[in-house]
């Protein structure tokens, strides 16, 4: 892991291929404007959410050490999160769905460390630290929900994607980046939106990853809990959006009972959601997850599972009934009466048993692919895997024996047996041949001159899932995102505005009480007349300091801003209302 990233015992468990997504948080890169955005959103959220969020939210803010006044330092958060068995890491925006879920399986919260611009303070399509830190982190303090999140990651990272899923992921990532970036050209945004819409309409049948991603969206991101008549918020997307958290509570948003049917409800990350799902409790989430998992190739295997892997065009694994696991890019399957009778991979392939690579059967041995029959021998009720040593001998299946094995469906394996491998239960899982020919009808599947033929043993495919069985079998450190989060060079004017924000923050924190807030206001009006957030911070200081004349000047200026920028009017009113309410309470 990068030396500038503070690790701990939870992060130390992460495999290398996940660490490639982690980046340092670089806390000093947050400007005073960034801190003010965090503070405004959190104050407004906590003020509103205390009555509409699940009780775990406010409790979780305390337990996870998240401050309302300052962007969380993840390394400080980790010292607290480890007490509930979790950790957090910083990443750059969206990462591939399988990786995101695999982090969850290791009890690691992925946090996009950038923060939304002031112009997008109510909602951003890009993941940011407000969404991740203020939305996801507090709820994981609830043990039942935390286990759901971990289990979701464990199941979700095995979901098989389609070849189009990754293309859509890259398109959505690009769209989220340019929509959040300053100075983006409207035509570029429109073009990116059009591309995402085109991909979404032409995805074909949804993959397992697409379906489970829907479940993730309608629970972890946009979930409600309780009754349809009086739901509470627990989804991070709602908890971190000062606009949508309020809107979702209105009758304009349809509330539906959460069931497995949510897997087929698509979503648009760039728009508020027209419907939301309500779970009665966190335990119900796990029941629906298990119901969906029972539909996955992970648990069903079979021909459909193999075909899903072939369609994905990506590294995947099948597990046979003997426990032997074959990992590679599956390209072909021969079927008979709806059953797979021969499978074939292309390129580097590895064999494993119980997620541990078989000695001598890594990608160096099977660098050009792997093929094997599956099923029972023709005319013999007893499968090879169930044969005792006496049975094997009776059918001439033993070392140095020249033999022809004909399988149901017509695959024939002819050669001299060299040796075999057994699993811990004593079942034979692999037989190696020399001078071997493998055929199916008129097709030759393996020739003697190709070398040793290793035949997998298994009467059926019991599981198929994304990724390798043994993470160490392949080089998985290959992710290069097609687009990076855009950080613009700051103009002199922007740096000047940041300096004003910093002065006010230092004053509030007691670091510098010598500044004149009246002078800051005057210069702000002169140089940055459209900025609305810093005047609210100045108003708070003046209000608490019992300075009615300065308060009036600030309020007059804010009224001018509201006339010039009607869209920020509600943001201004809400900010002032929080200050007045806090002052009355205090």
Image (cartoon, rainbow, N blue to C red):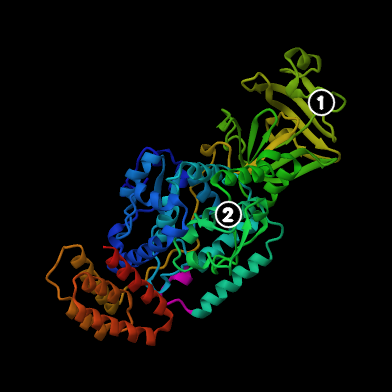
Tell me if 453 is positioned left or right of 563 in this view.
Answer: right
Residue depicted at x 73% and y 47%: 307
Quadrant of the frame with the C terminus: bottom left
Residue depicted at x 23% and y 73%: 543
Residue 227's disc number: 2
**What is the x, y in percent for residue 584?**
28, 67
Q: Judging from the image, what secondary structure is the residue with disc 2 in?
A: loop
Front position in the image: 342 or 541: 541
Front position in the image: 132 or 286: 286
Q: Residues within 10 Å of mark 1 (few under 14, many from 20)?
A: some
Circles 1, 2 touching at the beta carbon (< 8 Å): no
Tell me the CA gap for discs 1 and 2.
Answer: 65 Å
Q: Is residue 443 visible?
A: yes
Tell me if 304 is positioned left or right of 580 in this view.
Answer: right
Specify the segment rendered in magenta.
177-185
Q: Which residue is mark 1?
A: 404
């Amino acid at each position: 892991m990068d030396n500038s990233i503070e690790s701990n015992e939870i992060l130390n468990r992460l495999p290398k291929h996940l660490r490639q997504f982690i980046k340092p948080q670089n806390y000093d890169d947050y400007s005073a404007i960034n801190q003010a955005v965090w503070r405004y959103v959190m104050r407004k959220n906590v003020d509103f959410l205390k009555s509409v969020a699940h009780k775990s939210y406010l409790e979780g803010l305390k337990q996870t050490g998240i401050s309302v006044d300052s962007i969380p330092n993840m390394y400080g958060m980790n010292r607290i999160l480890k007490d509930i068995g979790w950790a957090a890491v910083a990443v750059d925006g969206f990462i591939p769905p399988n990786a995101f879920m695999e982090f969850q399986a290791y009890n690691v919260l992925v946090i996009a460390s950038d923060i939304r611009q002031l112009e997008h303070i109510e909602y951003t399509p890009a993941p940011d630290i407000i969404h991740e830190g203020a939305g996801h982190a507090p709820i994981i303090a609830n043990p039942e929900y935390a286990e759901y999140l971990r289990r979701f990651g464990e199941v979700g990272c095995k979901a098989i994607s389609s070849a189009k899923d990754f293309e859509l992921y890259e398109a959505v990532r690009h769209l989220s980046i340019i929509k959040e970036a300053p100075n983006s050209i409207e035509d570029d945004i429109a073009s990116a939106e059009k591309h995402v819409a085109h991909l979404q309409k032409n995805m074909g049948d949804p993959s397992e990853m697409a379906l489970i991603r829907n479940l993730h969206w309608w629970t972890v991101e946009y979930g409600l809990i309780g009754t349809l008549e009086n739901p509470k918020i627990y989804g991070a997307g709602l908890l971190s959006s000062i606009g949508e958290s309020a809107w979702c509570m209105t009758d304009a948003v349809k509330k539906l009972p959460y069931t497995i049917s949510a897997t087929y409800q698509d979503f648009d990350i760039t728009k508020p959601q027209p419907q939301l799902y309500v779970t009665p409790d966190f335990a119900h989430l796990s029941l629906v997850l298990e119901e969906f998992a029972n539909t996955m190739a992970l648990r069903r295997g079979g021909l459909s599972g193999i075909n899903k892997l072939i369609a994905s065009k990506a590294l995947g694994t099948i597990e046979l009934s003997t426990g032997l696991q074959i990992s590679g890019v599956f390209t072909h399957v021969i079927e008979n009466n709806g059953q797979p009778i021969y499978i074939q991979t292309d390129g580097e392939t590895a064999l494993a048993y119980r997620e541990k690579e078989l000695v001598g059967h890594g990608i160096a041995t099977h660098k050009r692919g792997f093929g094997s029959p599956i099923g029972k021998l023709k005319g013999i009720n007893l499968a090879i895997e169930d044969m005792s040593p006496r049975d094997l001998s009776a059918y001439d299946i033993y070392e140095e024996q020249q033999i022809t094995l004909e399988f149901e469906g017509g695959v024939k394996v002819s050669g001299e047996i060299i040796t075999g491998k057994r699993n811990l239960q004593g079942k034979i899982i692999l037989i190696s041949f020399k001078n071997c020919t493998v055929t199916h009808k008129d097709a030759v599947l393996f020739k003697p001159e190709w070398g040793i033929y290793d035949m997998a043993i298994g009467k059926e495919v019991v599981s198929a899932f994304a990724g390798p069985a043994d993470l160490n079998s392949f080089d998985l450190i290959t992710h290069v995102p097609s687009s990076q989060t855009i950080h613009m060079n700051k103009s002199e004017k922007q740096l000047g505005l940041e300096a004003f924000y910093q002065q006010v923050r230092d004053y509030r924190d007691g670091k510098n009480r010598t500044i004149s807030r009246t002078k800051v206001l005057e210069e702000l009006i002169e140089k940055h007349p459209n900025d609305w957030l810093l005047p609210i911070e100045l108003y708070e200081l003046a209000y608490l300091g019992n300075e009615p004349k300065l308060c009036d000047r600030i309020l007059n200026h804010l009224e001018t801003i509201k006339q010039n920028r009607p869209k920020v009017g509600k943001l201004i009113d809400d900010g002032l209302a929080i200050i007045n309410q806090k002052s009355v309470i205090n």
